[in-house]
Image: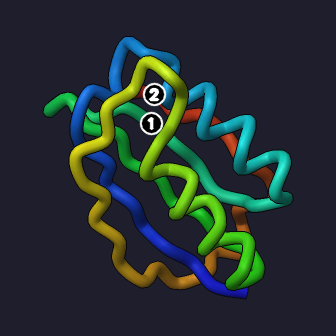
Amino acid sequence: MIGRHLRITGRVQGVGYRYWFLGRAEALGLTGWVRNRGDGSVEAVVQGPEDKVAAIVAEARSGPPAAQVDQIDTAEQPVDAMLTRFEQRPTC
């Protein structure tokens, strides 16, 4: 089990990116969260098996059809046992 923190920039707000990301994370069986940031980016914490985390990071480079992802910054994130499902959080 690994954890990653993602910051996704580009045209990722107002295009259903968070809802898309939530659906993909749930389908992959990941735990964590996703939210909009006040600067126009999307932030997420994902945790699960290494191959599933790698899969969502790869898919996040495209996102939903209306999105235009410019960059994804990733960082290692300690696994948080308190995260038992994947959720959407309020904008920070």
Pick whichever of labels 2 and 1 is earlier in the sequence.
1
The answer to which of 55 and 2 lies nearer the viewer is 55
Q: Secondary structure at mark 2?
A: loop
Q: Residue furthest top?
A: 14
Task: Tell me which residue sits at (52%, 84%) in the image.
Answer: 78
Q: Quadrant of residue 38?
A: top left
Q: Amino acid at mark 2?
A: Pro
Using residue 74 as the reference point, say whether residue 16 is left or right of it: right
Q: CA distance from mark 2 to mark 1?
A: 6 Å
Other residues around mark 1 within 10 Å, as few (<14) / some (14–19) / many (≥20): many
Q: Regarding mark 1 in the picture, which secondary structure is present there?
A: strand
Q: Nearer the viewer, residue 46 or 12?
A: 12
Q: Give me the disc on residue 35.
A: 1
> Looking at the picture, how far across and down is residue 27, in whole percent?
84, 47
Q: Tell me if mark 2 has few (under 14), some (14-19) or many (20+) residues whose alpha carbon lies within 10 angstroms of its own.
A: few
Q: Which mark is residue 50?
A: none
For image coordinates 39% across by 26% down, the residue present is 67
Instruction: Say whether residue 20 is left or right of residue 11.
Output: right
The residue shown at (49%, 28%) is 17
> In the rendering, at what x and y percent does residue 80 appear?
63, 74
Residue linked to disc 2: 90
Name which residue type carries label 1: Arg
Look at discs 2 and 1 and give the one toward the viewer. Answer: 1
x and y percent of residue 54 in the render? 60, 74
Residue in view at x 61 percent, y 59 percent: 56
Q: Quadrant of the N terminus?
A: bottom right
* Image position of 21 with respect to 48: above or below: above
